Amino acid sequence: MLERASRRQVWLMFIDARGCLGEPLIPMEGYPEDPNALTRTEDLGELTEAQLLVQRADLLREVTSSESVVIVWERIGPPAVGVDDREWARAMRDAAFALRVPLRAQFILHDRGVRLLHLDDIL
């Protein structure tokens, strides 16, 4: 489905009760450089970019009656985990844990394919 990166964007995907990929698949073009930068929304107040993304992903998860969220970080470049990849993946993991959002997995979609982010990749 996702073979190679063509731009910098993030994909939100949802896993259903059977453990299968469900609908919808949501690409969001671009994402902030710093996952820890503060932002303000009318409904949630001040929070980090990562917390905001987790909150919005969880809202979509609930609306779609999905069990968990999968995030794919699409970016041009090699399969090696970079500083930006690590910062976003760590911030999302931490925000999901703090907010009790079931984040099932994170992947990098790069120039040559897809890479699953393991715990060792983001420490």
Image (spheres, rainbow, N blue to C red):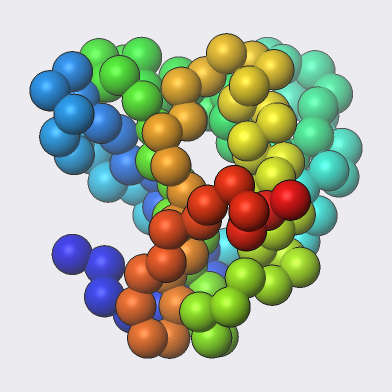
In the image, residue 39 sits, relative to residue 89, either above or below, namely: above
Left or right, residue 93 beside residue 34: left
Task: Please say if 11 is above or below 47.
Answer: below
Q: Is residue 6 visible?
A: no
Label count reads 0
Residue 85: quadrant of the picture: bottom right
Rendered location of residue 99, percent (x, y): 64, 15
- What residue is shown at x 72% (from left), y 41% (from top)? 91
Against 26, residue 48 (above or below) is above
Horizontal and vertical percent for residue 65? Answer: 25, 14
- Give the residue displayed 57% in from the left and 13% down from the top: 100
User: Which of the 4 image quadrants contains residue 80?
Assistant: bottom right
Position of residue 55 relative to residue 10, above or below, is above
Asked whether 11 or 99 is in front, the reply is 99
The location of residue 78, given as percent across then percent down, is 53, 86
Which of the two residues, 104 or 53, is positioned nearer the viewer here?
A: 104
Q: Quadrant of the N terminus?
A: bottom left
Q: Nearer the viewer, residue 41 or 91?
A: 91
What residue is drawn where x is 48% and y is 64%?
108
Q: Whole-percent x and y of residue 112?
A: 37, 86
Residue 30 seen in this snapshot: yes
